[in-house]
Image: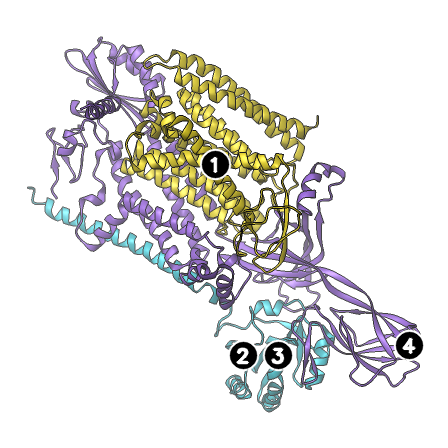
Amino acid sequence: MDERAVPQKNDKKKKRAVMRTVILAILIAAIGYTIYNSATAEEVSLLEVGDKAPDFTLVDLEGNDHKLSDYEGQGVFLNFWGTWCKPCAKEMPAMDRQYEAFSNDGVQVLAINIAQSDFEVQSFADQYGLSFPVVIDKTKSVMTAYSIRPLPTTVLVNPEGNIERIITGEMTEQDIEGFMEEIKPE
Amino acid sequence: MNLADLSSNLLYVAFVAYLIATFVFGGAVKGNKEGTFNSEKRWGKVAITITLIGFVANLGYFFTRWGATGHAPLSNMFEFTTAFGMTLVGGFIILYFLYKTAVLGMIVLPVALLIIAFASMFPSEVSPLIPALQTSWLAIHVSTVVIAEGILAISAAAGLIYLLKVVDPAKKSKQRFWLEAMMYSLVLVIGFVVVSSFFSLTGYEAEFTYVDKESQEAAITYAMPPIFGMNEYVALTDGAMTPLVETPALVHAGKLTTVVWSVLVGTIIYWLIRLIFRKRISALLKPFVKNVNLQLMDEIGYRAIIIGFPIFTLGALVFAMIWAQIAWSRFWGWDPKEVWALITWLFYAAYLHLRLGKGWQGEKSAWLAVIGFAIIMFNLVAVNLIIAGLHSYA
Amino acid sequence: MENLQCQCGHTNPPGTKLCESCGRSLTEKEQNSKLVDMRYEGTARRSQTYNKSVIDKIWNFFSSVKVGVSIIVVLLVAAAIGTILPQQAFVPASTEATIKDYYADTYGSVGRVYHALGFHDLYSSYWFIALVGMLAISLVIASLDRFVPLYKSLKNQRVLRHPSFMDKQRIYGSGPAAEDTLEKAETKLKELKYNVRTDKNGLLAEKGRFSRWGPYVNHIGLIIFLFGVMLRMIPGFYIDESLWLREGETRAIPEVPGYYLESKNFELENYTGEGGEEVFGEALDRVGTVAKNYQTDVVLYQNSEDALPGAADSQEVVTEYPIRVNQPLKFDGYAIYQMDFRLDELKAMTFALTNKETEESLGELTIDLINPVDNYELEGGSTVELLGYYPDFSGFENGEPQTATPLPNNPGFLVELTTPETPEGETSFITIQNTVEPLGENDFKLTFLSADTRDVSGLTVRKDSTLPILGLGGLIFMIGVAQGMYFNHRRFWIQQKADGTVLLAGHTNKNWFGLKKDLDRVVEYASLPAYTDQQDEIDKVEKAEKEGETLS
């Protein structure tokens, strides 16, 4: 046999093995990725901790504008709520107490109501004697921008304007205190 | 006579023409002595002419009904199934002109007759379209599907002829059993047609109220004496037969009653045939296929699938997806009808791979073609009537 | 495995069945059979050649048609199982627990088993996706393995083949012929649109070779399609949101930043059986009402540039459009579909303030349930003050009225009624069913007069960026199947030996009937020797043998 044929054959063999490995690897990776994606499909949320908090502007019950970016340098405690949501109502007094404790330390609370009437929100605020601004997201645009699903959901925004933490469900007063501590400016 | 009446009269004409043509094709095949194909040719010509007349009348039915309803008559069980009978004959005509085989007509036409008769058992009055169907995609999607299914069904007919010839009726075998089972199931369709026609001619009706599976009160009208009663039924019609068995809410006793009546009457007819001729039906048909060229039947069966498969893909998958995207916002939703279209498609894909890659020709191929037809019929009948879904318009 | 040296001197890769050059049979099996196996031209499928490493073994596994068909069949059966009971997407339950209960309650033990096996969500189960993935692997590998050698072999076809190749073709004939036979055959074949090549004493006529690429083209289409399906899983490519929009409401469109949708009106129209619809009378009598149209008249707004979410009055009208079934609103890569509706949700309620005893009315008031105010002044100097509003009253908790949802399904009002007769006011709690007077018996009450309602449109918001890819895949697939199925690859080999004898062989990948028709015309014109279909001969012999067996 020709002597050069042997290394040539080995070369070919090697090339073939590499080709096959690469093709199989790509295909299997694609399938693995698809399965992984389909398994986690429902957990995908658009916002994640560390993201820039989407800016918005909403009007409170007194008619004042609240623009998120105006609070840069302060920690912002965004609480999405509705009057029908019992856990929301339960955590309100605690939030109010902690707001009073932290408001001088540069922590702002914005309670964002989801598209209810002024009357309902006003009566609720009066009933609970809320001292922090309560704004109404009439078109659910802020809710959409933050992809809020269950209520209550609380989004902690740090003084740099980034999302520090997302909490779904009811918080205890202790939780609230800890969270406010987290976003308190240095 | 208005357009709708004209339409149904044309369907009668087509039906009668197909019936006559069946016998002439049978005569053409039977009269043919081995080696001489002269009489087959002569009578074949007569038979295909009658078939063509019937087909033109059938097309006439289709387009006059289109005119009468204002939409393509493909929107409910009656319309779709009738169209399927029509395209089956259409597919046969194409293949007859390619291969000039009278025996194919002798098998296809009675099947088409059965299908049209089956269709007529469903409400045939002109009905309006729900919003989802109000688009030209109805005509585009459904007509493509029905044409494809008509052509694909021809392969089953060719397969059946192939099997009738190769399966030995004298020897006990699995093949003989299943071949006869096919014949039996065709007779069951006759049973359904006979029993439905009988009770509808005698005007039988029995009304009941019952409790459905969501625990809601509902009403039902039986068109046949109720063998099975719905869950917690209460009879409203005086003198109606008391159901023999009450079924749980999950089972639709009305449909079950229809099925049992059909099987009962079909079985009686089947055994009458067996008793009169003292032969299996497949053996009865054997003399007709004596001179069949197996090679040719195999090729016709394959050819029909080759012609039908791309059309089926286009109609049942591509057009279906485009329409679903427009109407339901997603091109695919795993609706039972969609799934069974996919199953049909996968099945024929498997057929093609087995034939091309594994050399499955002849008898194996013939069995597959017959199974393919069974899947199509399942999708047409069972998925519409039993498995509820978005496509349950009938 | 070693290379195979053919008698003609050509060296073939291992696994080859028919010599690439002359067509001689190389394996014993081929030599003994009456007809050669022409699939893939007798070339070695690449994977058969090597079978050493694990990679090679996996590769070979997926290259096999048997495996491919098995995957198809398993998929088919699995898909069928998924239709036995409705999938979870179609059942009226949404949480995992309620879905489980639904299957158990509705279908009994069958439902319980079905759910336990995960068949209620079969089509998105990891094993079903894995099966589809395996089919994709099989498509890629089996195609590569066959296409490459087939392409090479059809490209390098020789005109002259060995007689043993020719006489093992299904269509074969030999016999004496005139001297100009080859030329005449060439003329006729060219007339029939064959590509004719000649070499010394032979010719090769070929037509429709491209149809042999059909299967590979359609497999490419399928791969592209499956790739598109895979992309949909990546966030951003695909959006599926639902939006319940009430008449008069403006809402941000979920997952569509900067856009808002307002519902001006929802309309449901049924067939009446009158006017031009008499023809449907009989059908309508049988089934009752049939819907003719669902329609939501919407206005689409877009935030002006650099406007923030929530900013009022910063929206500009993009378009007004009636969304109907089959007519989605399309904008900027998104589409909004009319999917569902709910009729007659409460919107406003009108009451009369009446004296309980005399039933005399002191005037009427209408409470807007969407946006109530706190004070209603009546003409005669009476006022109704709204103290509390509970749109979906669900009972009292610690004496406090509760609302279950923000929707006015069961509105409850806590009101104070002040009339000239009762200037100090009377408190009353009113719901649709009854009135509670918590602070003692009142002289006046609010009598319900009428209600205004509004309809709710169920809309679906969709973006599917993969559609062009899926469309491309579908198109390529259709081209591939048409190419492979509606065209045939036909070939004739004709050779004339020195003594004038002509050898004639023909092959097609399908439709032998058509091939014979072509050949008949050539045979007649060029006076070629008669040919036979050797498959028919084999069948006849087999049949005769079979009959012989039964006789003896």
Q: Which residue is mark 4?
A: C357
Q: Earlier in the sequence, mark 3 or mark 2?
A: 3
Q: Colour of chain B?
A: yellow
Residue furthest bottom as drawn: A101
Please give the label number shown on residue B266: 1
The amino acid pointed to by label 4 is Glu
Q: Secondary structure at mark 4?
A: loop
CA–CA distance in space, label 2 to label 1: 73 Å
Please give the label number shown on residue A86: 3
Q: Compared to B53, does B168 lie above or below?
A: below
Q: Position of residue B118 (x, y in %)?
A: 53, 35
Q: Is residue C394 left or right of residue C487?
A: right
Tag 2: Cα neighbours inside 10 Å, few (<14), some, or many (≥20)?
A: many
Letter of the chain that mark 4 sits on in the rendering? C
Letter of the chain that mark 2 sits on in the rendering? A
In the picture, one chain is cyan; tell me its letter: A
Residue furthest top as drawn: C178
CA–CA distance in space, label 3 to label 2: 21 Å
